[in-house]
C-alpha cells in the first residue's frame, strides 16, 4: 500500500538554526526567508525560540552529545543536519541525534526547500511508525493479560471455553472492554496473592 505524501505549506513556519555565526547561516536564512519561513539563530545551545519551532537546523560538524534538550534521537520536530564533513563518525552522530534530512555545506542559493520537505515527511513517517509499534505492544500485552485471566478463571474447575465465556460476561456486566476486564481480574489476583498470609493459631486451654 502506497503511503500518502503530504506537501506542507511552509509559509509562516518557524525554524531555528543551531549554528555559530557563519556565511552558511546567512545563506540559509536568505533561502528560508524567501520561502516564507520565520527564522531564529542560536549558538551554542537552543534557547526559548525552539519552543513551538516547526524545524531545527543544526551544525553536525560541531555537534556533541547532550546538545539538545530532549532524549537522544527523540526530537519533537523535524531535524536537518548541516554537514560540512562527510566523515562517517559525523554522519553517524547526526543520525543518532535524530536528523531527518541533511544539507551539505557550504550552503548556497538552494537546497533548503527540499531539505524541509524531506525532513517533514521522514518525521511524520517516524511518528506514525512509533504509534503503530506502541499500539501493537499494547494489543500484545492485552492478549497476554487475557490469556492469564482465562487461566485464572479456568483454574477454578472451568474449561477454557467456559472461562472465556465468564470473562466476556464480566466485561459486559462491568461495561468495560474484554482486555480491561482481564486486567482487573489479574490485578485482583495479584493483589490477593501479595497480601501477607495471616496464620491463625488456636489456643487450647487444658
Image: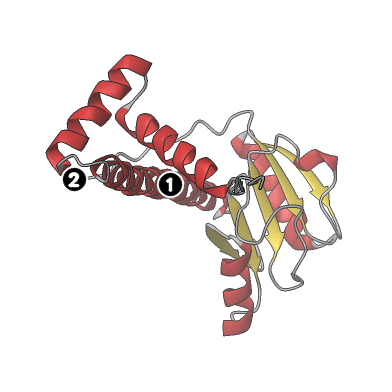
Secondary element at tag 2: loop
Question: In the picture provided, is 20 more to the left or to the right than 70?
Answer: right
Check the image and report above or below for 118 versus 54: below
Q: x, y (%) of residue 135?
A: 38, 42
Q: Residue at x 80, y 39 (%)?
A: 49
Image spot of residue 23 (x, y percent): 78, 61
Q: Please rate how many residues cluster around mark 1, counting C-alpha atoms within 10 Å: few if below 14, some from 14 to 19, many from 20.
A: few
Viewed as shown, does residue 148 lie left or right of 59? left
In the foreground, 92 or 43: 92
**Residue 4: x and y, percent?**
30, 39
Q: Is 69 on the left-hand or right-hand side of 13?
A: right
Within the image, what quadrant is residue 138 found in? top left
Task: Give the secondary structure at mark 1.
Answer: helix
Q: Which mark is residue 158?
A: none
Q: Tell me which label, 2 or 1, sits earlier in the chain.
A: 2
In whole angstroms, how far apart are the C-alphas of marks 2 and 1?
Answer: 21 Å
Residue drawn at (24%, 26%) of the image: 168
Q: Which of 87 and 156 lies nearest the eye of the viewer?
A: 156
- Residue of label 2: 1
The residue at which mark 1 appears reads as 134
Give the residue at x 60% y 49%: 199
Amino acid at each position: 500500500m502506497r503511503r500518502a505524501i503530504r506537501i506542507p505549506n511552509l509559509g509562516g513556519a518557524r525554524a531555528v538554526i543551531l549554528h555559530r555565526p557563519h556565511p552558511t547561516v546567512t545563506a540559509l536564512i536568505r533561502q528560508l526567508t524567501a520561502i516564507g519561513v520565520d527564522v531564529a539563530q542560536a549558538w551554542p545551545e537552543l534557547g526559548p525560540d525552539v519552543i513551538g519551532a516547526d524545524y531545527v537546523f543544526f551544525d553536525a560538524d560541531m555537534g556533541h552529545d547532550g546538545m539538545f534538550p530532549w532524549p537522544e534521537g527523540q526530537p519533537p520536530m523535524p531535524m536537518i543536519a548541516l554537514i560540512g564533513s562527510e566523515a562517517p563518525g559525523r554522519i553517524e552522530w547526526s543520525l543518532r541525534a535524530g536528523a531527518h534530512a541533511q544539507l551539505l555545506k557550504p550552503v548556497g542559493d538552494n537546497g533548503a526547500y527540499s531539505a524541509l520537505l524531506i525532513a517533514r515527511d521522514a518525521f511524520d513517517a517516524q511518528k506514525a511508525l512509533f504509534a503503530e509499534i506502541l499500539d501493537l505492544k499494547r494489543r500484545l500485552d492485552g492478549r497476554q493479560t487475557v490469556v492469564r485471566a482465562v487461566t485464572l478463571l479456568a483454574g477454578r474447575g472451568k474449561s477454557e471455553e467456559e472461562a472465556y465465556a465468564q470473562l466476556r460476561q464480566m466485561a459486559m456486566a462491568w461495561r468495560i472492554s474484554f482486555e480491561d476486564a482481564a486486567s482487573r481480574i489479574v490485578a485482583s489476583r495479584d493483589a490477593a496473592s501479595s497480601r501477607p498470609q495471616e496464620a491463625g493459631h488456636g489456643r487450647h486451654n487444658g
